[in-house]
Image (spheres, grey):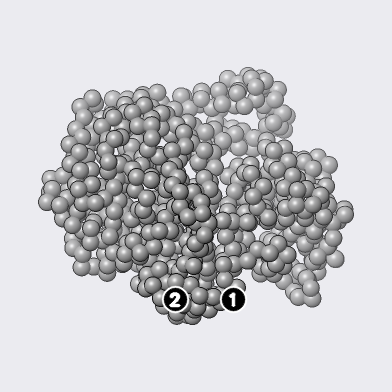
Amino acid sequence: MDVINKKRGIGLMKQYINEKFPHFLHGGDYNPEQWIDQKEIWDEDMRLMRLANCNEMSVGIFSWATLEPEEGKYDFSFLDEIIDKIYANGGRVVLATPSGARPRWMAEKYPEVLRVDDSLRRMHYGARHNHCYTSPVYREKVAEMNRRLAERYGKHPAVIAWHLSNEYSGKCYCPLCQQAFREFVKKRYDGDIHKLNTAWWTTFWSHAYTSFDQVEMPGPRSEKCVLGLNLDHKRFSSYQTVDFMKAEIAAIREFCPDLPVTTNMMPEHEDINYFEMAKELDVISWDSYPIWHSPTHARTTACAAFWHDTFRSMKQRPHMLMESVPGAVSWREYNKLKRPGMDRLSAIQTIAHGGDTVQYFQFRKGRGGYEKLHGAIVDHEGSENTRVFRAVAETGATLKAIDEICGTEVRARVAIVYDWENRWALELCKGFAVKDKQYSRTVYTYHAELWKRGIATDVVSAHSDLSKYDLVIAPMLYMTDSDTVARLEKFVAEGGTLYATYMLGMVDESDLCYLGGFPGGGLRRVFGIWNEEIDTFYPEDRLEITMDGKLYEGVDYAEYVHTEGASSLAELKNDFYGTSPALTVNEYGKGRAYYQTFRDRGDFFGAVCDKILGELNIHAPIATPLPELCTVHERNDGEIRYLFVENYSGKETEIALGDAWTDMESGETVDSVSLNKFDVRILKK
C-alpha cells in the first residue's frame, strides 16, 4: 500500500512524507526510557528540543523490555507521556516497532527465537538482532506488539510515520530456516529437482541432488562450493527478511492503514536486496555515517552522495536520513569529530540529493552501554552550551529557512546500475581478483565523476525501468538475466546511450556462463564486440591507454576484445594487447552502446563522460567550472529552481553562478557565492 502523501505545489505535485506535516523533519533517535527514573530530564529535553530547532523524535526503537517487562504484561505509560510531551512542544513522532531487540524473558521461555549460526550452534541471548526471522513464535510476538502500538497510537496527531524495527540484518541456520530454505528453492525451481541440478551445475564434483530434502544451507560444516546454492541462499536470506518485515507491516495496517512505513537501510549492507525491500515500503530511509576528514575524505564525500541518490531513486521521491551523527561515532577504529560547518554541510547534502529529513543518532547520550560515547545533540554535560548543540541548532535554522523546498524533486537524465544480486554473484565468483573485485568501489568511481560535475544521477537496479533516462552507465554488470538483457537492448534500440564496462554479461541468473561468447544473452550484438579474454593484474601492474593523443593508465583488469561492427575510440597500448580496443561504440537501433574494456581510476571515464554529456545536452545547473571538492545540485517544483552550492574542500573558495539567484537565508540577489571551508549556500530562482 502506497500512502505517501502528495500535495499540489507550484508546477507539479509535491510529495511529502506526511502531508499533515509538510515540513523538513529535524530530530532523531530519542530513548526516554533510559531516564524513566529521572523524569525531570524529560522536561529538560523538551526545552532543548525547541532550542535545537528540532521538530521530530524517533521513539520506541529499543523499548520492548520496558513496554512488556513480562510476557503479556504491558506498560505503555512512558510512551503515552513522552509522545504527548513531544506533541505539546511542537514536535512530531516517528514511532518504531521494537523488534530489533527482544526482551530477555522471550529468549529464556522460547529458545527458538534465538538464531543458529552457520556452524549450527544456537546463539545465547545477547546484543541485538539475535532473533530468527522464520520463528512462528517470534513473528506472533512481534505482530501482537505491533497491533497494540498501532491501536494505541495510530490516530495520535503526533505520530506521522512508522519506523519498522532497526537495521534489519543477519542470517539464521536453525531447522526452521533450513526447511524454509528448502521450500524457497523448491518453489524457485517449480518442484523439479532436475531444474535445480541444472541451475546449480551439480554434475561438477558429483554434487547432484536427488531430493529437495537433501538441500542444506551453505556453511563451514556443510556444502559451500556450489555457487548456485550460495547465490540462492543469499536470495533466500533477503527474501525471508523482507517477508518478516511484511508481517510487521500487516499487523500495523490492521489498526493504522494510512500512516507511511519505513525502515532504516544501511549503505554497503550485503544481506538484503534493498531494491526488493523498497517495494514494500512507502518511504525509504537510511543511516549515514561517512568518515569525514579522513585521508579518504574526497571519496567519502562522493560516496555519501551516491547512497543518497540510491535511496532516493528507489521510490523516485524524497527519502529520509534516519540516522547520522552530530559529533563523532564511537565504534570505528578512529572516531574523529565533525569540523565546524560540517554538520550543516552534510545535512544539506541530504536535502540537495532529494532527502526531506535530517535525523541523528542520538538526541541525548546515555550514561552507560555500548554507545554511551556515541555523538549526540545533548552531551553528558546536559545543556545547550556545547559546540555540537549549537551546530545542530544552526542546521535546524537553515532547514526552517529553506522549508519551501520540502517535497520537491530531483530530476535526473542519467542513471547508474548498482545491483545487489550482481554484487552477490561477483563476490561468490572464483575468478578475477578472488578476494575483492571492488564492485561497489568501481560503481562509486563512475558516480563520482558525475557528482563532481553537478550532474543529477539516479541509481537503479538491473531490473529498473530505464525509459526516462538519456544515459545509463552499467559498470561490471557480470550477471544479466533475460529481463535485464531485454531492458538494456530496448533502451539502446529506442535511442538511449548505454555505457558498460569489462565483465559485462558473463553469466545468467543462476551464475551459469553464457555460451557463444561474451557479452552473452544477445548483448554481444548490441555492443558489436566479442570479449575473448579478461586479464587480472597484480596491484603494481599498469597498462597504457591512448585516446585522442592522450595517455591514460589502466589498473586491475583489461579485456582482449574484438570489434564486430563497433568502432574503436581508444586503444590498449602495451604488453601483448597491441592495438586492442580500450573503448568502443556501436550504433544500435536509434541509440549507442559504449564499452570500456579496462579499469581506470576515473580520469579516462571523466574525459569520455564530458564528450557524451555534451552530445546529449546534459549539463550541470550552472556552467561555471567547479573547484576541486565543490559541487552543485538542484531540486525544483516545476517552476522554481533550488540550487545547492557545496564546498567539501576545507578551503575557502568563490564560485561564479553565471546568473542572478536569490540566497534563501539572506534574501540577497547574487551572481557568485563565497564559501568558507565546509560551507554551503542555498539559492533559488
Q: Is residue 2 left or right of residue 477?
A: left
Quarter of the view holding residue 360: bottom left
Residue at horizontal 37 percent and vertical 38 percent from the top:
259
Comparing 146 with 153, the one in front is: 153
Instruction: Assign a secondary structure to mark 2.
Output: strand
Q: Amino acid at mark 2?
A: Thr
Instruction: Please tell me how crowded label 1 is: few (under 14), some (14-19), or many (20+) other residues with Cα within 10 Å.
Output: few
Can the viewer see residue 207?
yes
Residue placed most toward the observer, 335 or 25 = 25
Q: Quadrant of residue 601?
A: bottom right
> Compared with residue 557, is residue 524 higher up or lower down, i.e. above or below?
above
Nearer the camera: disc 1 or disc 2: 2
The residue lying at 26 percent from left, 50 percent from top is 91
- x then y, percent, for residue 342: 39, 68
Q: Position of residue 302 (x, y in %)?
A: 52, 63
Tell me: residue 639, above or below residue 493: below
Q: Tag 1, which secondary structure? A: loop
Say which residue label 1 marks. 625
Q: Which percent across, then down, holds residue 296? A: 50, 67
Which residue type does callout 1 highlight? Pro
**Is 9 left or right of 336, judged from the image as shown?**
right
Name the residue at 45% across, 62% down.
349
Does the rendering let one see residue 335? Answer: no
Please say if the residues under marks 1 and 2 sit with CB atoms less than 8 Å apart: no
- Report the residue at 54% width, 42% height from top: 275
Q: Which residue is mark 2?
A: 669
